[in-house]
Amino acid sequence: MKKINALFIFLFFYSVLCHSAGSQIEIEQLQEINDRSFEKMEAARKEANKSIENQIKNTPERKKAILDLKKSWESTIQKKCTIEIYESLNTDAEIATRNRCLSSEYLKEKIFFDNVYP
């Protein structure tokens, strides 16, 4: 009976330790995915902002209209991505999915402002 109890205790602790190690690896992988998606999103946002700054520089008389559009566009992007990632809310994939959506939308914004003619 003591051997069975000892075996049970050993197996219990072994499974807990193995699960913890597996969980730690998964946590690190998820963090890496989220970090990369954030970096891509930030790069896309910066590119969009550069395009907006160039438009303002090239057409200063349109500055107010451009900034108003930027503000509206940002609000739309946030709302659109919230709807688009609805299935991912409160899951491990939520952050990366949101960042992918934001990246895509910022790139669309950049393309739009790059193609506005003065």
Image (cartoon, rainbow, N blue to C red):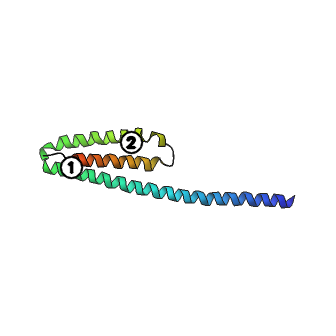
Q: Is residue 89 left or right of residue 46?
A: right
The picture places residue 116, in percent across and down from the top left corner, at 18, 45
Asked if 93 appears above or below 19 in the picture, the reply is above
Task: Tell me the amino acid under the disc marked 1.
Answer: Asp
Q: Is residue 109 left or right of residue 8?
A: left
- Provide residue 63's location: percent of width, then percent of height: 17, 44
Which of 67 and 93 lies nearest the eye of the viewer? 93
Q: Are marks 2 and 1 in contact (CB under 8 Å)?
A: no
Label 1 neighbourhood size at 10 Å, few (<14), some (14-19), many (20+)? some
Res. 69 image quadrant: top left
Image location (x, y in percent) of residue 89: 48, 42
SS at badge 2: helix
Name the residue tied to disc 2. Answer: 81
Q: Earlier in the sequence, mark 2 or mark 1?
A: 2
| Residue at x 45%, y 39% (from the top left corner) | 86
Provide the secondary structure element on which disc 1 rests.
Answer: helix
Left or right, 110 with respect to 117, comes to right
Give me the residue at 36% from left, 39% from top: 80
Who's the residue at 67% across and 57% down the image? Answer: 16
Q: Residues within 10 Å of mark 2 (few under 14, many from 20)?
A: some
The single residue placed furthest to the right in the displayed view is 1
- The N terminus, quarter of image: bottom right
Mark pair 2, 1: CA separation: 22 Å
Q: Nearer the viewer, residue 33 or 46?
A: 33
The amino acid type of the residue labelled 2 equals: Cys
> What is the number of callouts on the image?
2
Q: Residue at x 62, y 58 (%)?
A: 20
Q: Which mark is residue 114?
A: 1
- Residue 63's mark? none
